[in-house]
Amino acid sequence: MSHVTPVPPAEDPDSPLDPAAMRAQYRTSGLREQDLADDPYRQFARWFAEATASGLEEPNAMIVSTADAATGRPSSRTVLLKAYDERGFVFFTNYGSRKGLEIAANPHVSLLFPWHPLARQVIVAGRAERVAPEETAAYFHSRPHGSQVGALASVQSTVVGSREEIDAAYARLAARYPEGTEVPVPMEWGGLRVAPESVEFWQGRENRLHDRLRFVRVVDSASEAGWRVERLCP
C-alpha cells in the first residue's frame, strides 16, 4: 500500500532521528463516491473486514479524543472498539476516569481508527452516551477473568503511590473472586456509545493527494436522519 523511505541509523545511538526525513509514498487505487456504501456503518463494516483480513494487529484499536468542558483542553488515548451498529460505536471504560468525566460534562467525542499499513483512516465525530446497564453487564462477564478483576481493582486515572499498590489490590480481589466465581461489575464501569454526526473515510494516495470522503448526518423536516457525502481536499 505504501513505500517508506528508510532513514539510516545515526552514528551516535543517542542522537535523535529526523522525522522530517521519514517519508511514505502511498500507492493505492483510491476511493470514489460511487464505490461507497449507502451509509457510514456499512462502509465501516467493509473497511473493518478488510483491515482484519489484512492481518493488521488489533484493527479495533481506536484513538478516543475528548475535551474538558471548563478549559477546552483536549486529551486522547487508545481504546478498543467492542461493538458497532446503526446506533453508533461502543467502547467500555471507568466512568470516573478522565475520559469518562470529560464525556459526562462534554459528550462531544472524536474517534480515529489509524489503519496505517492500509494507508487508511476512519474519523468519527459524534456524541457519546452510556449504554444500558444490561449491555454493560453482558460484555463485562464475557471478558477474561483477569480483566474483570483488574477493572475492579483499578480506580482508573487516579494517582497511585506505586505499582505495588496496584498489584496488592489485584491480589486481594483475585483471592476474593477466584477463577470460576462471578466478579461483580464495578459501579463506575460501563459502556459508552458514540452516535456519529459525521464519519470520514481517508484513503492515502500518491503525492499526498489523498481521498477524503465524509458522511454527514442530515435530518429532514420529518426528523428522519439521512447522510450527505462530501469530498474534502487532502
Image (spheres, rainbow, N blue to C red):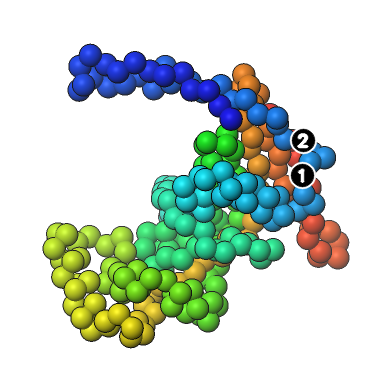
Image quadrant containing the C terminus: top right
Q: What type is the residue that disc 1 sits on?
A: Leu
Q: Which mark is residue 36?
A: 1
Please report the residue visible at 23 percent of the width from the left and 84 percent of the height from the top.
Answer: 176
In this view of the protein, which residue sits in the foreground, 65 or 221?
A: 65
Q: Which mark is residue 32?
A: 2
Please report the residue visible at 84 percent of the width from the left and 59 percent of the height from the top.
Answer: 220
Q: What type is the residue that disc 2 sits on?
A: Arg
The image quadrant of residue 88 is bottom right
The image quadrant of residue 26 is top right
Please report the residue visible at 20 percent of the width from the left and 81 percent of the height from the top.
Answer: 175
Q: Is residue 197 visible?
A: no
Mark 2, residues whose alpha carbon is within 10 Å: few (<14), some, or many (≥20)? few
In the image, taking residue 162 as reference, residue 124 lies left or right, namely: right
- Asked if the residue under mark 2 is in contact with the one under mark 1, i.e. CB atoms within 8 Å, the reply is yes
Please report the residue visible at 35 percent of the width from the left and 69 percent of the height from the top.
Answer: 147
In the image, taking residue 66 as reference, residue 128 lies left or right, namely: right
In this view of the protein, which residue sits in the foreground, 213 or 142?
A: 142
In this view of the protein, which residue sits in the foreground, 216 or 139?
A: 139
Q: Position of residue 166 (x, y in %)?
A: 20, 65
Q: Position of residue 139 (x, y in %)?
A: 48, 73
Q: Is residue 30 above or below residue 134?
A: above
Q: Position of residue 152 (x, y in %)?
A: 31, 74
